């Protein structure tokens, strides 16, 4: 992991102190709410449905156990509303649907698709104290919201993937530093998200980002970036266009400076829904890219001062050496693998965990293990204070003290010895984090939705719970295979519904919750094919219909699939008509429509 | 260049119609605007959240403009540091702003990561 220097540490503390001054002035009435708003947002503080929400940045997903423990402490000590507020929130929620709403929970953190950790109940007057606590372990909320360059996301297997050409983490860190408190780019037309991978398999959905970067080697072994610009979800899903097939690695900041500067000048500011760079790229096309190239040339002519020195790359890269996990001798590896196979035979539950939750590693003596935060009784990606603490303990005991928040809202332990997998399985199982459902239907992505978020049109979590309940049987989940189910409570698409094989979008009609279903989306992974948005099945469904719709769609798959064929492949092969017809046939509350 | 804070009350009612002064519109291209004979440029913040003038100031400095670049409009003390670092030399504060506190905020950070109109990135300074 990146080791914070004295400068890095004092910078985070200075940021926390700056925030405390802003909060103090807001509370004293000398900094108005409108003027305070973008300042608190750029520190991760939203004001949500019932309480503020804090979004803590986890740069490119890497957390150490000390940081996890502080997140646990925040969940325990700060993430709790007053009894009055909780009662008010619950009674308001109870009036939304038919019958009482699910119980709102407190004292937990929530993993997001962008490697952030969110808390939902911290009172704003405690917010500066929380920032100080976060700063004590080099954590913060810098640029996790607001119209600026956001927290940079990456591959959950960065530095350990077997298909990796170049470890993207040093570049992600250099870009994090460049984008942190950039004076010129703090008030862009809209938010700006960068994702970076160095692998063949895209585990970071780079084409769905404002800027997607793939670090690779050319034929002569030089390192550079494929640069994609102008992707995004939201109301208008757009796949990013390639700006450069291979930009020398040391030019990446100079080039991104051109990309963002032209966007800052040209991006629309008259309509929030048309302000993202994707709209600019779509509207201007080649003219935008020509201007970026011209600006890049001007930056070069001016001395290209953000050309990354080799010494700086070396300094940062030195932080990302593999931790000193004891080498596993070949004989021990073989013995361990033998033990794994025999336990997998006698305990099928373990076999499934091994198949779904354990991934290969650059180091043949190690594995990457995903702790599943997708289970009955808790919302996708939610972790209680106890679970956060337990995760820290598991990271210490089995993974050199490191864990990673991944794009699918789970935690990955990246440095697990193959001869400790069985012990880890027992420990994770005891903690309720060993559900063998990674990449399966119930490993769904879902945003917090209308239970917490002020933007949501509909709730995501009751749906996620209903689907989890319907698909509890691991035999059935296994039989259905790998399926990306993504749920967003509104068009802002935090639940990435556009990229789900099955996408669900909450919409509001006449104050009622409705859900639009899409089929065939892709995040750009090998399984899913080139990144693309799913297609809408038909008019929105009532909440009570959605689980049946999913079941009807999956029945078509089970009926029509070839041996060993994945859901997305059957859908691509057959086309969506049969699936649409089945979905529409599952309507009982909404009027039936012809498929 | 340190940022000079100017209170709105100290501004004349109307700017002198002087050929050496240029009021650059928010959507003007700072790269191509003619600067011959210009010694004073005002850039506008129609709303404090509209960040186009930061880039305009940066580009003007890159072109070698050494005269005054003044921030006008919705200028708040919490954005002064960004103005100074982008190349502004003065800022006319919105009437309700506390100039003394603004001056204090300008000194809150001692160093930054990235380069700006005032200097090189940290990775070049450290090297």
Image (tube, rainbow, N blue to C red):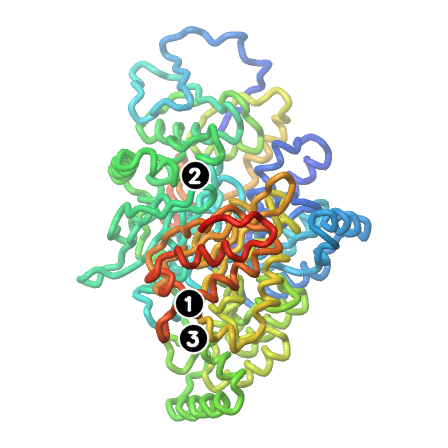
Residue drawn 44% across and 19% down?
B42
Which comes sooner in the sequence, label 2 or label 1? 1
Which comes sooner in the sequence, label 3 or label 1? 1
Do labels 2 and 1 touch, CB within 8 Å?
A: no
Which chain does the residue under circle 3 lie in? A
Query: From this viewpoint, is residue B110 visible?
Result: yes
Please tell me if label 2 and label 1 are on a single chain.
yes
* Residue A170, position as x, y percentages in the image: 39, 59
Whether A77 is drawn above or below B83: the answer is below
* Residue A442, position as x, y percentages in the image: 54, 67
* Residue A229, position as x, y percentages in the image: 34, 45
The residue carrying mark 2 is A276
Q: Is residue B99 left or right of residue B71?
A: right
Which chain does the residue under circle 1 lie in? A
Residue depth check, mark 2 versus mark 1: number of the one nearer the observer: 2
Viewer-side residue, A166 vs A480: A480
Instruction: Count residues near mark 3 (Cα–Cα under 10 Å), then give few for <14, some for 14-19, many for 20+.
Output: some
The residue carrying mark 3 is A359
Q: Secondary structure at mark 1?
A: loop
Do labels 3 and 1 touch, CB within 8 Å?
A: yes
Q: Secondary structure at mark 3?
A: strand
Q: Would you identify the image quadrant in which residue A20 lies?
A: top right
Which comes sooner in the sequence, label 2 or label 3? 2
- Judged from this view, the residue extending furthest toward the right is A84
The residue carrying mark 1 is A157
As drawn, the label of residue A135 is none
Whether B74 is drawn above or below A396: the answer is above
Whether B51 is drawn above or below A560: the answer is above
Which chain does the residue under circle 2 lie in? A
| Alpha carbon separation for disc pair 3 and 1 | 9 Å
């Amino acid at each position: 992991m990146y080791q914070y220097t004295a400068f890095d540490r004092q910078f985070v503390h200075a940021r926390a102190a700056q925030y405390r001054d802003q909060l103090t002035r807001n509370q004293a009435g000398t900094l108005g709410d409108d003027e305070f708003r973008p300042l608190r947002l750029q520190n991760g503080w939203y004001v949500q449905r019932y309480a503020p929400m804090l979004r803590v940045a986890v740069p490119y997903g890497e957390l150490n156990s000390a940081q996890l423990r502080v997140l646990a402490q925040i969940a325990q000590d700060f993430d709790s509303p007053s009894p009055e507020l909780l009662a008010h929130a619950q009674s308001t929620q109870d009036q939304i649907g038919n019958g009482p709403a699910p119980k709102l929970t407190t004292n937990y953190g929530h993993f997001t698709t962008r490697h952030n950790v969110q808390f939902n109940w911290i009172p704003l007057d405690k917010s500066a104290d929380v920032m100080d606590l976060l700063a004590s372990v080099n954590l913060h909320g810098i640029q996790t919201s607001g119209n600026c360059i956001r927290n940079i996301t990456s591959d959950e297997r960065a530095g350990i993937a077997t298909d990796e050409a170049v470890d993207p983490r040093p570049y992600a860190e250099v870009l994090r530093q460049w984008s942190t408190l950039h004076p010129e780019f703090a008030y862009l037309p809209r938010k700006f998200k960068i994702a970076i991978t160095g692998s063949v398999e895209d585990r970071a959905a780079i084409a769905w980002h404002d800027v997607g970067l793939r670090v690779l080697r050319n034929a002569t072994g030089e390192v550079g970036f494929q640069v994609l610009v102008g992707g995004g979800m939201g109301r208008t899903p757009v796949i990013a266009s390639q700006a450069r097939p291979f930009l020398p690695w040391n030019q990446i900041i100079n080039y991104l400076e051109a990309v963002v500067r032209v966007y800052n000048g040209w991006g629309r500011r008259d309509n929030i829904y048309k302000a993202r760079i994707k709209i600019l790229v779509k509207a201007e096309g080649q003219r935008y890219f020509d201007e970026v190239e011209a600006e890049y040339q001007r930056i070069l002519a001016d001395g290209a001062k953000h050309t990354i020195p080799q010494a700086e790359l070396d300094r940062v890269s030195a932080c990302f050496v593999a931790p000193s996990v004891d080498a596993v001798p070949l004989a021990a590896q073989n013995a361990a693998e033998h033990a794994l196979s025999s336990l997998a035979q006698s305990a099928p539950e373990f076999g499934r965990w091994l198949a779904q939750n354990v991934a290969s590693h650059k180091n043949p003596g190690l594995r990457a293990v995903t702790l599943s935060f997708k289970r009955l009784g808790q919302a996708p990606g939610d972790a209680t204070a106890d679970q956060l603490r337990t995760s820290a303990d598991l990271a210490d005991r089995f993974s050199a003290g490191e864990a990673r928040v991944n794009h699918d809202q789970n935690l990955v332990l990246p440095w697990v010895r193959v001869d400790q997998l069985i012990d880890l399985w027992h420990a994770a199982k005891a903690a309720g984090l060993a559900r063998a459902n990674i990449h399966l239907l119930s490993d769904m992505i879902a945003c917090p939705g209308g239970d917490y978020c002020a933007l949501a049109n509909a709730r995501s979590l009751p749906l996620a719970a209903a689907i989890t309940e319907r698909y509890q049987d691991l035999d059935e989940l296994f039989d259905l295979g790998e399926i990306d189910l993504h749920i967003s409570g509104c068009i802002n698409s935090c639940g990435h519904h556009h990229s789900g094989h099955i996408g669900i979008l909450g919409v509001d009609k006449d104050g009622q919750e409705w859900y639009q279903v899409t089929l065939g989306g892709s995040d750009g992974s090998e399984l899913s094919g080139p990144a693309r948005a799913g297609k809408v099945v038909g008019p929105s469904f009532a909440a009570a219909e959605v689980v049946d719709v999913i079941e009807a769609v999956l029945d078509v798959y089970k009926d029509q699939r070839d041996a060993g064929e994945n859901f997305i492949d059957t859908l691509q092969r057959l086309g969506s008509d049969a699936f649409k017809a089945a979905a529409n046939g599952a309507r009982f509350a909404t009027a039936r429509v012809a498929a | 260049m340190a940022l000079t804070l100017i209170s709105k009350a100290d501004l004349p009612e109307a700017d002198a119609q002087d050929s050496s002064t240029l009021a650059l519109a928010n959507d003007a291209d700072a790269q191509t605007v003619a600067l011959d004979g210009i010694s004073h440029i005002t850039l506008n913040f129609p709303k404090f959240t509209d960040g186009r003038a930061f880039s305009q100031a940066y580009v003007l400095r890159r072109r070698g403009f050494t005269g005054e670049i003044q921030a006008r409009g919705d200028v708040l003390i919490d954005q002064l540091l960004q103005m100074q670092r982008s190349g502004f030399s003065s800022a006319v504060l919105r009437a309700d702003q506390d100039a003394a506190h603004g001056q204090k905020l300008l000194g809150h950070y001692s160093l930054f990561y990235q380069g700006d109109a005032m200097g090189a990135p940290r990775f070049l300074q450290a090297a």
